[in-house]
Image (spheres, helix red, strand yellow):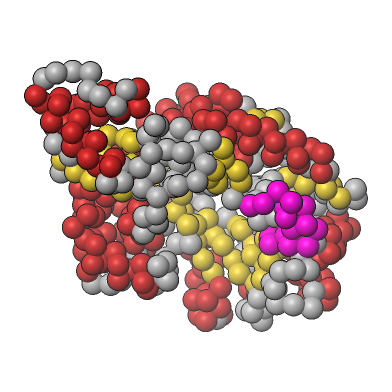
Amino acid sequence: MKFLVHAFEAGSGLYLYDAVTNRIFPVNNRIFENIDNILFDVNASGTPSKKSSDYLEAFCQIKHSIDKKIIGTNKLNTMHYTFKANNYKRKLLDSIRMLILEVTEDCNLRCDYCIYSGNYKDYRCHGSNNMSMSTICSAMNFYKDHNTNVEQAVISFYGGEPFLHVEKVVNAIEYGHKIFDKPQHYRITTNGTLIDDNFIDWFIKQTDVSLSITFNGDKGYHDLFRHFRDNTSSYEIIIKNIEKIVSKSSAAYKNRVSFQCNYLDWQDISIINAAFSEHPLLKDKIPRSITSINKNLEIEFLDELRSRRNEFFKETASHPTTMDSLILAYINELKVDCDTVLTNIFNKVFLQIYGRPMYELKSSFCSINACEPLVNRLYINTEGAFNLCERVGSSNCFGNIHEGFNYSNISKMLYEFNEACKNRCINCWALRFCQVCYGNVLNNNSIDMNKLENFCAVMKKNVEFWLKKFCDFMLREGQLLKAYQHKLNLT
Ligand code: SF4
Ligand code: SF4
């Protein structure tokens, strides 16, 4: 008998999480201290190896929980992808959901944490390559031919900064309007500094085009990491450009302009939250995504960013807050049923734990939680080569717009990924919360076992952290979460 039990200590008490049944339950000190030995004994001989009364009592309680199937036995002996391999090739032919075009490698800003800043291993730096109009059209034709089984065409313009070549973006969208005979959605991911009147006049007429502006809300905090090459501020320019959009069409701003934010440390979310609660242009907006700055930065540089951030907080009236106060503020916001930066962030983690499917893993196989590479998103670089997505560093062996998919390299990558994960995941207590991204484990188109080790360590630490916070704060708040789960249709 094998088990997938993880014991953890939260502020509110001692708990066991069982990944086979997906249950969390409180336990006493005797069980908590002896759980590994007890499960070993149950597995090895079925009898207790220690004679102390504390151990015997704990052993009987755990044995009882196993007999009652509160703790399940781990029958897994293999993992497979969430998607079926046979089906995958067909999906590459007709079901690609999103096309991402790297319009240019260049950018007018030099954000410190940019993945193209040169401060990350395995990522290209800002370059001077731009996508030609003929490559753009070929890429869109390729996508059109490989998206026939999907109801909508979704095309995202990415960079660098796509507004450096806004005329190509506009031409591409007009080309898309001609070739697609289905609903389309175009998204331009931008730093927001180059949006001019001509573009806005065009944009407000295009109901299928949206802008996603990376903007960290608070002037000081935004400019700390997002600035021009000469370190000058980008905040004021972005605000002026947003004002221009609002003055020309508040409806276009309301419905088709969104924001994405990045933070260095969790506590900094309070700064972003305050900006999006108070600034007149932002207070009715909830950022589409709020993500942590990629911590795979070279370590010395990450330390430098941290010390700069700490200096900023010393000099400003804004102060970061603790995670616990953020969660308490989130609970208050759930009580008054409002959507904010905090609900956007915490709903994702707490609803995932609260709404976890409580069925027992009974079969011998289970799915690896990973996306369908190249089907979910097909990233095409300035030269027309395929990449998995914008989060994966340089990997250019999966085909190109002229020759199509390189099935042999795609299969090799998937095979290696499966081989690397299958034996480790069946013995991992975090498997029901884990979501693996190829970007976390690939290096030069192959699986890098060191990267995978690091990924697993961070994933398990994160899952444990959120299970603890869930037990400390959210176990009592089931009614609030149930209402939200229902509202978001996550039941
Ligand atoms: S705006 Fe985007 S691409 Fe440009 S430097 Fe900043 S993060 Fe990098
Ligand atoms: S943390 Fe690692 S071993 Fe555990 S499920 Fe995720 S990928 Fe597999």
Which residues lie in the magenta part? 83-101
Q: Residue at x 47, y 57 (%)?
A: 289
- The image position of residue 74, as x and y in percent, is 42, 38
Residue 315 picture quarter: top left
Q: Residue at x 61, y 58 (%)?
A: 189
In front of the other: 429 or 384? 429
**Lateral position of residue 244 relative to residue 153, left or right:** left
Residue 128 in view, yes or no: no
In front of the other: 336 or 322? 336
Q: Is residue 370 magenta?
A: no
- Location of the N terminus (image quadrant): top left
- The image position of residue 52, as x and y in percent, is 11, 20
Q: Residue at x 52, y 55 (%)?
A: 214
Q: Residue at x 56, y 62 (%)?
A: 212
**Lateral position of residue 175 relative to residue 224, left or right:** right
- The image position of residue 264, as x and y in percent, is 41, 41
- Location of the C terminus (image quadrant): bottom left
Residue 419 in view, yes or no: yes
**488 vs 63: above or below:** below
